[in-house]
Image (cartoon, rainbow, N blue to C red):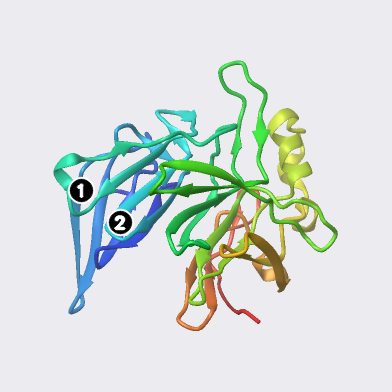
Amino acid sequence: PEGMADGATAPADGGLILIGGTSASEALRDVNKLTVADGKVTLAPLPQLPAAVDNMAAAAIGSKVYVAGGNVAGKPSRQLFVLDLDNLSAGWKKLRDMPGNPRVQPAMAAAKDANGEVCLYLWGGFAGKHDGKQATLETDGLKYTPSKGKWSELPAPVDAQGNPISTGGTAATMTDGRIAVAGGVNKEVFLEALRNQAPDYLQHPIEWYRFNDNVLLFNPATGTWSIDGTDKNAARAGAVMIADQNNGFYLIGGELKPRIRTAETLHITLK
């Protein structure tokens, strides 16, 4: 119904759940379900979020849609919310907070763990200066196990030189159950900008920002990472990843450097 950005989406219940974000003037609580049938697009309202949320991650497990991190009511958040599409009258429920620092713009996907339970897997995220606290940036990950209502730690993805890869990436679960992660900013460059941004920070060429060009795979059954390869066209922040039906994915949009975005769609077939 209006121009929106910085929200999150999750495919569920035969449609796409559009969650929160920002309009041109404010952060939003709105949630809608978009469906397409016989060439007709339908947008139906769902229960609003408990507070305005933007720059978060979202994923669905069955009929339950989860929202993690982002800015909640304008502040960097560690919160996790869930909406059961089979019980809309209950609205959004707050679950256990993520441990550690707030995580704005994390990457998240749902996949089966070694016990066969579908869990949430989340990496990265940052928090700007807030409430008198210094800016922070995360490279490690977290796993949320719904049956236990608990978070546990996950290793950080690293490049071939062992350097951790940080926020701004995107994730999706492949048909073989592994989670692909692509894109993201350089930890040192971005954290320095968060804490002490130089006047010319936005004026450098694309290569200076050293966005991640590694295509990474996380195996939730073993809890280990591997590098599928590198692709300079995948070095984007804030892109959207959508799995195909044959262990590959589409990478849509994103930033090539701060404030410079691309409309390009890239397809990558995993090894």
* Residue at image point 14% right, 42% down: 89
Amino acid tagged 1: Leu
Label 2 vs label 1: CA separation? 9 Å
Dot 2: what SS? Answer: strand
The label on residue 17 is 2
The quadrant where residue 262 appears: bottom right
Amino acid tagged 2: Ile
Q: Position of residue 28 (x, y in %)?
A: 33, 38
The quadrant where residue 68 appears: top left
Instruction: State the residue position of label 1.
Output: 46
* Residue at image point 50% right, 64% down: 172
Judge by depth and name the residue closer to the eye, 201 or 10. Answer: 10
Q: Is residue 202 visible?
A: yes
Counting labels gives 2
* Residue at image point 53% right, 74% down: 249
Q: Position of residue 204 (x, y in %)?
A: 78, 49
* Residue at image point 40% right, 28% down: 73
Q: Position of residue 163 (x, y in %)?
A: 80, 53
Mark 2 or mark 1, earlier in chain:
2
Tag 1: Cα neighbours inside 10 Å, few (<14), some, or many (≥20)? some
Q: Is residue 4 visible?
A: no
The label on residue 86 is none
Dot 1: what SS? Answer: strand
Dot 2 and dot 1 residues touching (CB under 8 Å): yes
